[in-house]
Image (tube, helix red, strand yellow):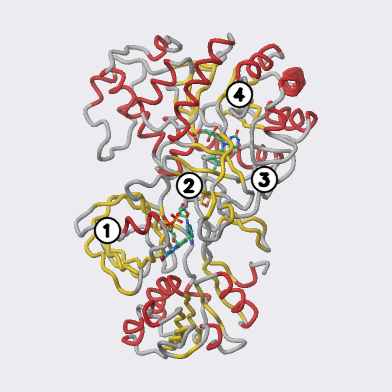
Amino acid sequence: MKESIYKITENCQIADKTFGMELSGDSAAVSRPGQFINILLPGSFLRRPFSVCDYGEGWIRIIYKIVGKGTEKMSHLQKGDELSVISGLGNGFDLSRIPESCALIGGGAGVAPLYGLCKRLLLEGKKPAAVLGFNNAGEVFLEKEFRNLNIPVTVATVDGSFGQKGFATDFFEEGGYAVCCGPEAMMRVLYKKSGDGMFSLEARMGCGFGACMGCSLETRQGFRRICKEGPVFQKEDLLW
Amino acid sequence: MVDISTTMPGREGGNANGGEEARSVDISTSLSGLLLSNPVIPASGTFGYGREYWDLYDLDILGSIAVKGTTLEERGGNPLPRIAECEAGMLNSVGLQNPGIDRVVSEELPELYLHYKKPVIANISGFSVEEYVAVAVKMDAAPNVGILELNVSCPNVRGGGMAFGTSASNISLVTREVRKACSKPVYVKLSPNVTDICEMARAAEDAGADGISLINTLLGMRIDLRKRIPVLENVTGGLSGPAVFPVALRMVWQVSRAVDVPVIGMGGISSSEDVIEMMMAGASAVQIGAANLRNPFACRDIIMDLPRKCEELGIRSLREIIGIM
Ligand SMILES: Cc1cc2nc3c(=O)[nH]c(=O)nc-3n(C[C@H](O)[C@H](O)[C@H](O)COP(=O)(O)OP(=O)(O)OC[C@H]3O[C@@H](n4cnc5c(N)ncnc54)[C@H](O)[C@@H]3O)c2cc1C
Ligand SMILES: Cc1cc2nc3c(=O)[nH]c(=O)nc-3n(C[C@H](O)[C@H](O)[C@H](O)COP(=O)(O)O)c2cc1C
Ligand code: FES
């Protein structure tokens, strides 16, 4: 974990109420896809957590949806603006536990961390397939980027206005390995349908680095902090 | 005389030229015979048992550390969401999640000692007088505990915490029993959710308290407008952060005039100015809570800034300004 000042190099709308933000700064603390950063926004007391969508030396990309006051203000930030960011938070996806063939299933903003994960799985020679779920055509993002990775991609929209009609979970083959991030309802279905998998969870956070016990979850191993021992939990850990 | 500038890790915005100035300012203080190199203490519940912070900065710069509220048995706390926000602060309904006294004294405190050699403040909670006493006795025996802080003011648990702290006779009872059973200084941490805070402080002092800590969080609530349900699963939670500072300051001022024992002031402190203001109101030392969650370096930054701020305000020794209002 590291606190440092990042400069916004890009902040633009990529879908309905959805923005992509690229930040330049010291990304040395980011060690795995699926970790998150905690951003201090002008005017908000607590920081706001966002999954790292992709990262490299000196940069981090996030994708965020406007859902409230903080993210609304965030969408008005300009290229060149500086932000205090705590990076390298959470455990992220343990790539060594993901089998050669797996499905990455994202719902809404939950699609974001799966992109950086997908790139790294491919570098390891693994063969992921992606299922991206959205409410409608206007909300779809990262579809082209996933296709450019030359993997099987299914896009599902609830109203059928883009790709397949239905929920992302409808296009997951029962018994397979599921790596997922999205609404809890979606992940609970995948918990039932999957043979095994990883689940990236969310909670309203006080600190994001394990100090306040604001995000505690009861698991098979006892109480675990979503911000510290999570946000990614193994299927066998969850008490769903 | 404390020269903190030499031990400080560098950071932009820090007190780079504070070395010379710092030498002429004494920022040390004391609590019931315990000498503190400076008045800044992370508040209970925002610093765990130190584990999340000792890799971030040298904890030995802290005046002391108030560890997480500890109970007899392990507690998982309240259901999520436990955190909400407001304009200049936050609400929590954590509900005293902690590993229980036995693991705290056998694992957490000894490990904290490897990173922090000074005495710490043991924050204690319970659901009966017997439970407070049982936890206090074990904390009293822990070598790196310097002060016992009875949390009779947690708003997030039923039957315990605040249920004790809103009744003067309960405060009196629990303070007397713990005082009898323990040898270290006993501080009572008061709830602001009462009509007359001075009555509670006097009850504690009369029962033998060696000091008073205040304030714990103010009972509050938020509603999710879209879902039309409370944000917190527990419905209500404790408000803290800059929003409560003026209330905390007023209560510290009132209590420090009502009792003769030292007062640890807290509630919304987030800068060196706030520390000085709280001490002018009557606090001998201060605790910093929510600010650590927003900025994990908050305590370090405030300690670094204190000598310069004192110099600027013509304060040569922090002890001189305690309770000058
Ligand atoms: C580990 C993690 C990773 C996340 N990754 C992403 C991401 O990649 N893209 C994205 O769009 N969103 C992500 N979120 C959700 C994002 O943090 C919230 O949408 C955001 O904090 C809302 O802020 P706001 O001020 O706009 O909303 P408000 O509702 O005004 O916020 C008020 C408070 O509620 C909290 N809050 C509200 N909704 C959520 C939520 N769903 N999860 C956690 N806290 C919430 C805020 O942090 C704030 O403290 C993530 C959350 C977590 C915990
Ligand atoms: C997340 C959180 C957990 C807390 N847990 C405890 C606790 O276990 N025991 C206690 O006495 N006070 C607890 N408090 C109260 C603080 O110690 C402090 O009294 C209060 O937050 C006011 O200070 P602040 O405004 O600087 O946060 C907690 C506060 C927060 C924000
Ligand atoms: S958000 Fe503070 S412990 Fe997880």
Label 1 belongs to which residue?
A76
Identify the disc placed on residue B99. 3
Query: Residue placed at 26% from the left, 30% from the top?
Result: B15
Q: Are marks 3 and 2 in contact (CB under 8 Å)?
A: no
The location of residue A142, given as percent across then percent down, is 35, 79
- Decide: is B200 above or below A183: above
Which quadrant would the N terminus of chain B be assigned to in this image? top left
- Disc 4 secondary structure class: strand
* Residue type at numbered disc 3: Pro
Q: In which quarter of the view is residue B168 placed?
A: top right
Identify the disc placed on residue B85. 2
**Frontmost residue, A214 versus B101:** A214
Q: Answer with mark 3 or mark 2, whichever residue precedes in sequence.
A: 2
Mark nearest the camera among 3 and 2 is 2
The location of residue B316, given as percent across then percent down, is 32, 12
The location of residue B220, given as percent across then percent down, is 56, 40
Identify the disc placed on residue B147. 4
The chain under label 3 reads B
* Residue type at numbered disc 2: Glu
Q: Are marks 4 and 3 in contact (CB under 8 Å)?
A: no
The chain under label 1 reads A
* Residue type at numbered disc 4: Ile
